[in-house]
Amino acid sequence: MDTKKIAALDGWHTLDQNNPALLGTQCTSCGTYYFPKQTNFCRNPDCNSVDFKEVPLSNKGTVWSYTSASYQPPEPFVPTTDPFEPFTIAAVQLEKEKMVVLGQTIQGVTPEDLKVGDSVELVLDTLHTDTDDDGNAVEKVTWKWKPVTS
């Protein structure tokens, strides 16, 4: 039986392995983008709209900043190795929306491999595997950033 894949954070991204996208919202009045989704009111000070549409966000961008998570984050973080192995986090400015979204990089990418302005793309990766109420394996998937090599 195949392992069922679900988003680790329901509604935050698609599960399309070939063309993954974060799911955000866009104000229908001023066009401001939000991630995670905004549904209460537009935070643009020049707008007072409460109308939003769900939109897929750019899956390409440039590194705005980066760092290493050298310590194990607290729950609900689920470590994938024992002992904990540090991982790299990148703040990425999305290509179209020009907003910055934080996320892990793929395994094996260290801060020494990155520089501000590098091109990256969104990929889906297994966060961890769990079991559902029936005892079936469930793969929880999240987004990560992968450097684009020329």
Image: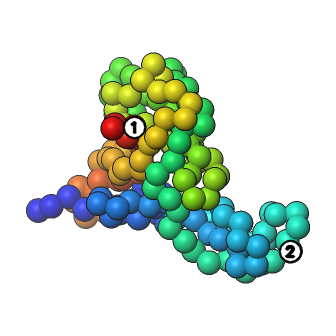
Q: Which mark is residue 48?
A: 2
Circle count: 2
Disc 1 on helix, strand or loop? strand
Residue furthest out toward the front:
150
Q: Residue 58 at x, y = what percent?
A: 50, 59
Question: Marks 2 and 1: in contact by CB < 8 Å?
Answer: no
The residue under the point 37% across, 40% down is 148
Q: Which mark is residue 4?
A: none
Going by the numbered disc 2, the residue's amino acid type is: Asn
The answer to which of marks 1 and 2 sits earlier in the sequence is 2
- Crowd tier of the residue under label 2, counting other residues whose Cα lies within 10 Å: few below 14, some 14–19, many 20 or above: few
The C terminus appears in which quarter of the rendering? Answer: top left
Asked whether residue 74 appears in the rendered view, the answer is no
Q: Is residue 47 above or below residue 20?
A: below
Q: Of the numbered discs in the image, which one, if any, rests on residue 147? A: 1
In this picture, residue 33 sits left or right of residue 117 = right
Front residue of 23 and 116: 116
Q: Position of residue 116 (x, y in %)?
A: 56, 30
**Disc 2 on helix, strand or loop?**
loop
Residue 59, given in percent of the width and then of the height, sits at 45, 55
The answer to whether residue 107 is left or right of residue 40 is left
Quick one: label 1, few (<14), some, or many (20+) residues within 10 Å? some
The label nearer to you, 1 versus 2, is 1
Res. 51 image quadrant: bottom right
